[in-house]
């Protein structure tokens, strides 16, 4: 009942910038947190950045100072501004949304988007 859609990926040169978007929709009562994860070929999926409904953020050490999260709660959307991109940032980026489904069930959920490819190359 909850859909998650990412967008904004693409090809960029080292040092360039990109902004990813993640929009959640469906039978949502409340979103508690939204996060970005990435997975490079042959590697395990890892946390990139995370934001709570209260606005608290958490970043992986590898992206601190370069990536910035922001959100528009009225649109159930979170953005990941990526600056000073490096080749090692190349991966498929996935959005995860955690919250509660609409009444009467109020079922907790954690939903993933389909992913968006980010490629950093000269």
Image: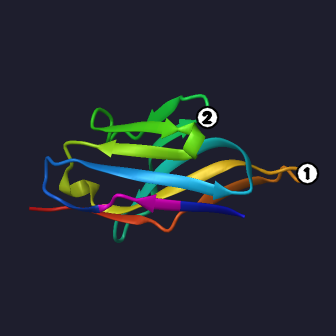
Q: Position of residue 120 (x, y in %)?
A: 20, 59
Q: 94 left or right of 107?
A: left
Regarding mark 1 in the picture, which secondary structure is present there? Answer: loop
Residue toward you, 101 or 89: 101
User: On screen, 90 above or below 106?
Assistant: below
Q: Position of residue 8 (x, y in %)?
A: 34, 58
Q: Is residue 42 above or below residue 121?
A: below
Residue depth check, mark 1 versus mark 2: number of the one nearer the observer? 1
Give the residue at x 47% y 35%.
58
Q: Residue at x 53, y 29 (%)?
A: 56
Query: What is the quadrant of residue 117 in the picture?
Result: bottom left
Residue 38 image position (x, y, % from top left): 41, 58
Q: Which residues are magenta?
A: 5-9
Pick the front one: 5 or 91: 5
Q: Residue furthest left?
A: 122
Q: Residue at x 44, y 36 (%)?
A: 70
- Which residue bears the numbered disc 1? 104
Q: Quadrant location of residue 49?
A: top left
Element class at badge 2: loop
Classify residue 10 as left or right of residue 7.
left
Q: Main secondary structure of the magenta part?
A: strand
Q: Is residue 46 placed above or below 52 in the rendered structure?
A: below
**Residue of label 2:** 53
- Is 112 within the magenta? no
């Amino acid at each position: 009942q909850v859909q998650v859609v990412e967008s904004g990926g693409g090809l960029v040169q080292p040092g360039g910038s990109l902004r990813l978007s993640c929009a959640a929709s469906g039978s949502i009562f409340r979103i508690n947190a939204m996060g970005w994860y990435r997975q490079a070929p042959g590697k395990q999926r890892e946390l990139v950045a995370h934001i709570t409904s209260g606005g608290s953020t958490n970043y992986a050490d590898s992206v601190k100072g370069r990536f910035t999260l922001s959100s528009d709660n009225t649109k159930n959307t979170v953005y990941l501004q990526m600056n000073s991109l490096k080749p090692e940032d190349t991966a498929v980026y996935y959005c995860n949304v955690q919250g509660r489904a609409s009444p009467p069930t109020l079922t907790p959920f954690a939903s993933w988007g389909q992913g968006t490819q980010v490629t950093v190359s000269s």
